[in-house]
Image (cartoon, rainbow, N blue to C red):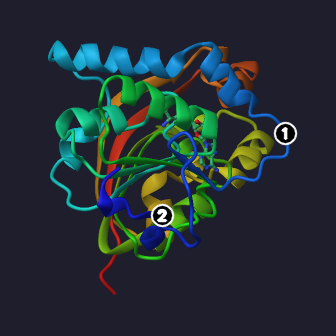
């Protein structure tokens, strides 16, 4: 781990990595999600899939090319079994300084193991914490990035406000996430929309408005694809929508935002 990631200067309290992961989560029970990811060997499979795509010249999703131009420490939020932008970041810049976050320590320890086998990620630190209450010092990060992270966090506005707090003035948020098409979203019953929007307001009003409300200046929103939630395996929202006869279509978009200098 690089000296840039001297943990004491970034975290609000002293930490010691165990299995390469600093862990701030007080768990009451077992990490069932992480255990499932390990059983399915998803991290190793995803890493090798992304690496093969990269080597074949057909890279998968990820903001590595944009992030390669950023200086300083990148915080990748809710990296999950796909690693979020991490594979793409490392393919573009093997020496990038990254703090990789998720709620699941098991998923992060697995990323640490898989990358170590490949001698990749020299300057990567893995940190398990709740992105809605980050144990990081204010203005300690140069860039926050995520790929589908904020869309998967219940209470996403709190997580985005935390991202703004830990960004230095002038620091940037780069993210990819999905936004349901209005015409499809409106076909869901009011009660369903209200329930989902209470924890994920971007589902109804989009990320641009939410990022702005959380204190960021949105510089760009670019649609890069379309996703259809037509399979119950696409998650609870997809299942609920299908029950109501709606196969939600969503824009996949890249957002670039900046924290104002003052
Ligand atoms: C299923 S993943 C999808 C996106 C992910 N970036 C990927 O590439 O796989 C969502 C991840 O968000 C994490 N997560 C959910 N809530 C979180 C929170 N409050 N703080 C940090 N991570 C969270 C979950 O543990 C899970 O790994």
Q: Mark 1 sits on what residue? A: 29
Question: Residue 163 got which mark?
Answer: 2
Q: Please, is residue 112 above or below residue 123 in the view? A: above
Q: Residue 12 carries which label?
A: none
Residue 209 visible in the current orientation: yes
Compared to 190, does 252 lie above or below? Answer: above
Whether pointer 2 and pointer 1 mark residues with C-beta atoms closer than 8 Å, the reply is no
Residue 58 showing in the rendered view: no
Q: Nearer the viewer, residue 1 or 23?
A: 1
Give the quarter the ligand 1 occupies: top right
The part of the image, by quadrant, that contains residue 260 is bottom left
Structural crowding at the residue carrying mark 1, measured as other residues with C-alpha within 10 Å and reported as few (<14), some (14–19) or many (≥20): few
Give the quadrant of residue 212: bottom left
Position of residue 44 measured from the top left corner of the image (x, y, whole percent):
45, 18
Q: What element carries label 2?
A: helix
Whether label 1 lies within 8 Å of ligand 1 gets the answer no
Q: Using the image as rendered, state which of residue 150 and residue 99 is in the foreground.
A: 99
Relative horizontal placement of residue 194, taking residue 181 as reference (left or right): right
Could you say which quadrant of the image residue 3 lies in? bottom left
- Label 2 crowd (10 A; few <14 / some 14-19 / many >=20): many
Residue farthest to the right, as pictured: 28
Measured as percent of width and height from the top left, residue 145 is found at 38, 51
In the rendered image, residue 62, in percent from the top left (x then y), is placed at 31, 35
| Residue at image coords 74%, 34% | 31
Number of the front mark, 2 or 1: 1
Residue, x 58% and y 63% (percent of image)? Answer: 134
Q: Is mark 1 on a helix, strand or loop?
A: loop
Between the residue at mark 2 and the residue at mark 1, the CA separation in whole angstroms equals 27 Å
């Amino acid at each position: 781990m690089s000296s840039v990631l001297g943990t004491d200067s970034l975290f609000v309290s002293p930490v010691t990595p165990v299995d390469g992961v600093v862990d701030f989560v007080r768990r009451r029970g077992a990490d069932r999600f992480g255990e499932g990811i390990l059983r399915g060997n998803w991290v190793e499979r995803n890493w090798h899939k992304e690496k093969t795509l990269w080597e074949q010249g057909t890279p998968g999703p990820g903001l590595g090319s944009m992030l390669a131009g950023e200086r300083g420490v990148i915080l990748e939020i809710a990296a999950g079994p796909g690693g979020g932008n991490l594979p793409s970041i490392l393919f573009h810049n093997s020496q990038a300084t990254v703090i990789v976050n998720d709620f699941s320590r098991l998923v992060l320890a697995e990323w640490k193991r898989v990358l170590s086998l490949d001698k990749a990620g020299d300057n990567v630190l893995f940190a398990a914490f709740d992105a809605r209450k980050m144990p990081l010092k204010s203005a300690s990060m140069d860039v926050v990035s995520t790929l589908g992270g904020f869309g998967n966090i219940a209470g996403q506005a709190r997580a985005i406000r935390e991202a703004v707090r830990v960004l230095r003035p002038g620091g940037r948020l780069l993210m990819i996430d999905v936004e349901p098409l209005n015409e499809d979203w409106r076909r869901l019953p009011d009660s369903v929309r209200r329930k989902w929007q209470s924890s994920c307001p971007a589902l109804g009003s989009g990320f641009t408005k939410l990022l702005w409300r959380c204190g960021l200046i949105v510089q760009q929103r670019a649609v890069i694809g379309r996703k259809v939630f037509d399979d119950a395996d696409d998650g609870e929202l997809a299942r609920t929508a299908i029950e109501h006869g709606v196969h939600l279509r969503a824009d996949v978009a890249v957002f670039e935002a900046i924290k104002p200098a003052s």
